[in-house]
């Protein structure tokens, strides 16, 4: 009977091994499956007599072991999260890179064509065909800005949708992991093998890492899963719900929240890895900066062109009007601020652009320390950039420093009230590209001529020369009263004459007089006089006073050069440029904006041109997209290595399983022969009796 029992134990062990091999083979393509192996131990030996010894009693199947290496599994999980993040980032970045850099969808070609048309107007200032072509191209350029802004906005909406969908998938997986924790704990307590359950749990964690980077801590209650800087998603048999919802500071962007006992905790800033990590990194590093920078370029373009046009004279003999829409319209100012959810006050802010050249393309956080005083921090680094006091009188007026804070100023409340502790997100440039449009309808309204024209007196007898006068005072096109006052001041001061006086030792005096010969005064009421050095070029800066609509003395500055050797009583007249003039100086100045450094002129920076600023945007996004592709290649290689290493230990090898199958078939046959031998011996013994 002992020999039969030994044979039976061998049959059982071999049968279990063959069944395990069959199970391994059947699951060769099952995701996350870890191959299994039968473990046997020798049965308790039987004593064959005192002083004689013991004889073996066969084998016992002690366990079906899961071939698993925790370190290799962790490597696979981490590399899965990195690869998924890189893929999500690269996919999105490539879209925006293609859109901005392509000649048919980007801005560069349209912008270059716009300035080419501007140069054509400069070359032929009175030709209506050139002016009409310029207006057409300006419309095409503004439409391209609008189109790209709409596509960027659509991408932002798409990211919100993806975050919402992926968060739901995260919840499904965390719920599955929590359920598997319970099942594995119960199976282990009942001494039941939980190999398949543990494989399923590992696979669920791997899939979770494809969605969001997580860390796993294993203990006696199962897997505890954490994300970010330790925010729990699963603890033992409990999972915590994740949701994507509008941010409390910016409802256009969704943030991630994890609910603990019904209370949401925002984890957006700490989440990395997986599809979610890639989407969030793309939004913060590429999409938002590109949106803001595109808006900055469009706002500088509109501001600089409109301001220069206001310094010119059109074909009708009137001061120039705007080509592009007002960047400080009531709607535009009110849309640059949004109050944080939970603010005590009910108000929102008006944000005006005070100097487009100083705009940075950043977002800002404005915090009120009282009902009127506030501080401003630059996002995302939180650096303090200024403070101010909100004017609450009626009508409200700005109380921030002259020139604003980095190119913008908080002018007033657009609605409601504010209270101490209220926080606002200010986005000065984000709507710039979507808001630009062409408002000039008549090509004759394009102010190609400079406002002032000089001419030498017909009775001049000297050899004095001159350059055409330039108005160097920049008009405030966003304050209609100040703009009209300046234009009226120019009208009221002209025509005027520069009258040369007598010379002594090569120094010659001059005075500025009006049409009646009376002195023209400066802002302080003093007659404008000066002197030149004969025989060389002399730059004259004429600061001419005028009275504005509030009866306050103001001034504008005109620059011109006088050279050569004028005689006493030689004159140079300065008058407003008339209607139908072929003068092209203002058009030339407008064409010069293509290369003029008008973007980012702050903090000691010399700035860059409008065209170069857009080129830098394209280059930056292209670099990030290229780096994204490199990251995909690198992380895919790391993931492949981690998977190979994991499969080298836990994966099923069909060759190995086939060899083991032959081996255990032989073991099974051998055990059968032992039983057969035992039967023969037993029969012989019975027959002999």
Image (cartoon, grey):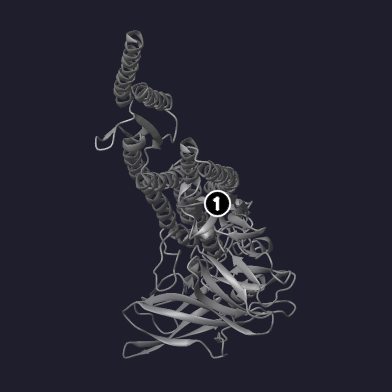
| Res 38 → quadrant | top left
Q: Position of residue 395 (x, y in %)?
A: 73, 77
Of residue 422 and residue 48, the one placed in the foreground of this image is 48
Of residue 205 and residue 583, the one placed in the foreground of this image is 205
Of residue 324 and residue 389, the one placed in the foreground of this image is 389
| 39 to 168, vertically: above or below | above
Number of numbered discs: 1
Give the structural element (helix, strand or loop) at label 1: loop
Q: Position of residue 480 (x, y in %)?
A: 66, 70
Q: Residues within 10 Å of mark 1 (few under 14, many from 20)?
A: many
Q: Residue furthest front?
A: 689
Q: Residue furthest left?
A: 52
| Image position of 608 (left or right of 340) | left
Q: Position of residue 108 (x, y in %)?
A: 44, 48
From the image, which quarter does the N terminus lie in?
Answer: top left
Of residue 490 and residue 273, the one placed in the foreground of this image is 273
| Res 640 → quadrant | top left
| Image position of 210 (left or right of 689) | right
From the image, which quarter does the C terminus lie in?
Answer: top left
According to the image, label 1 marks what residue?
236
Q: Is residue 400 visible?
A: no
Q: Position of residue 623 (x, y in %)?
A: 37, 50
Q: Is residue 666 visible?
A: yes
| 687 to 329, vertically: above or below | above
């Amino acid at each position: 009977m002992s020999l039969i029992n030994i044979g039976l134990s061998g049959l059982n062990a071999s049968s279990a091994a063959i069944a395990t091999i069959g199970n391994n083979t059947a699951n060769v393509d099952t995701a996350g499956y870890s191959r299994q192996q039968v473990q046997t131990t020798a049965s308790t030996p039987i004593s064959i007599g005192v002083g004689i010894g013991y004889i073996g009693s066969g084998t016992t199947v002690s366990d079906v072991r899961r071939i698993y290496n925790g370190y290799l599994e962790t490597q696979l999980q981490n590399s899965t999260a990195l690869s998924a993040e890189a893929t999500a980032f690269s996919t999105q970045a490539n879209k925006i890179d293609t859109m901005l850099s392509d000649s048919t969808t980007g801005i560069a070609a349209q912008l270059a064509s716009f300035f080419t048309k501007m140069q054509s107007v400069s070359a032929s200032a009175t030709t209506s065909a050139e002016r009409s072509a310029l207006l057409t191209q300006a419309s095409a350029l503004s439409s391209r800005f609008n189109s790209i802004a709409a596509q960027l906005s659509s991408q932002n909406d798409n990211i919100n949708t993806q975050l919402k969908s992926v968060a739901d998938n995260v919840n499904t997986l965390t719920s599955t992991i929590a359920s598997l924790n319970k099942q594995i704990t119960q199976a282990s307590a009942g001494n039941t093998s939980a190999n398949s359950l543990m494989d399923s749990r590992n696979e669920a964690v791997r899939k979770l890492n494809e969605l969001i980077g997580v860390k796993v801590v294993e203990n006696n209650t199962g897997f505890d899963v954490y994300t970010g800087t330790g925010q729990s998603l699963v603890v033992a048999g409990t999972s915590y719900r994740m949701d994507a919802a509008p941010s409390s500071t910016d409802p256009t962007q969704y943030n991630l929240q994890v609910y603990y006992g019904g209370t949401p905790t925002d984890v957006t800033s700490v989440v990395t890895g997986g599809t979610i990590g890639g989407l969030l990194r793309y939004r913060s590093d590429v999409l938002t900066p590109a949106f803001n920078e595109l808006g900055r370029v469009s706002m500088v373009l509109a501001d600089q062109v409109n301001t220069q046009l206001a310094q010119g004279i059109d074909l009708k003999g009137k001061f120039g009007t705007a080509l592009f829409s007002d960047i400080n319209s009531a709607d535009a100012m009110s849309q640059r601020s949004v109050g944080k959810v939970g603010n005590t006050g009910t108000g929102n802010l008006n944000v005006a652009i005070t100097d487009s050249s100083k705009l940075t393309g950043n977002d800002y956080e404005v915090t009120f320390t009282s009902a009127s005083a506030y501080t401003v921090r630059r996002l995302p680094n939180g650096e303090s950039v200024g403070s101010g006091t909100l004017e609450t009188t009626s009508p409200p007026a700005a109380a921030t420093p002259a020139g604003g804070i980095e190119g913008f100023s908080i002018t007033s409340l657009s609605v409601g009230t504010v209270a101490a502790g209220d926080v606002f997100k200010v986005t000065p440039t984000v709507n710039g590209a979507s808001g630009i449009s062409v408002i000039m309808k008549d090509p004759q309204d394009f102010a190609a001529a400079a406002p002032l024209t000089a001419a030498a007196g017909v009775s001049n007898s000297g050899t004095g020369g001159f350059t055409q006068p330039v108005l160097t005072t920049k008009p405030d096109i966003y304050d209609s009263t100040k703009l009209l006052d300046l234009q009226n001041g120019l009208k009221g001061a002209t025509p005027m004459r520069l009258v040369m006086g007598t010379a002594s030792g090569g120094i010659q005096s001059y005075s500025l007089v009006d049409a009646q010969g009376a002195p023209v005064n400066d802002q302080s009421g003093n007659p404008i006089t000066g002197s030149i050095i004969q025989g060389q070029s002399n730059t004259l800066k004429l600061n001419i006073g005028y009275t504005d609509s509030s009866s306050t003395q103001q001034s504008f500055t005109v620059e011109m050069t006088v050279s050569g050797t004028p005689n006493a009583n030689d004159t140079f007249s300065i008058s407003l440029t008339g209607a139908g003039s072929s003068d092209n100086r203002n058009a030339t100045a407008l064409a010069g904006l293509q290369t003029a450094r008008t973007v980012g002129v702050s903090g000691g920076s010399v700035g860059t041109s409008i065209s170069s600023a857009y080129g830098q945007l394209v280059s930056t996004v292209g670099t990030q997209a290229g780096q994204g592709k490199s990251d995909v290649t690198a992380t895919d290689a790391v993931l492949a290595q981690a998977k190979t290493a994991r499969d080298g230990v836990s994966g099923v090898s069909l060759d190995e399983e086939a060899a083991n199958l032959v081996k255990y078939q032989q073991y099974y046959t051998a055990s059968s022969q032992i039983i057969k031998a035992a039967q023969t011996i037993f029969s012989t013994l019975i027959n002999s009796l």
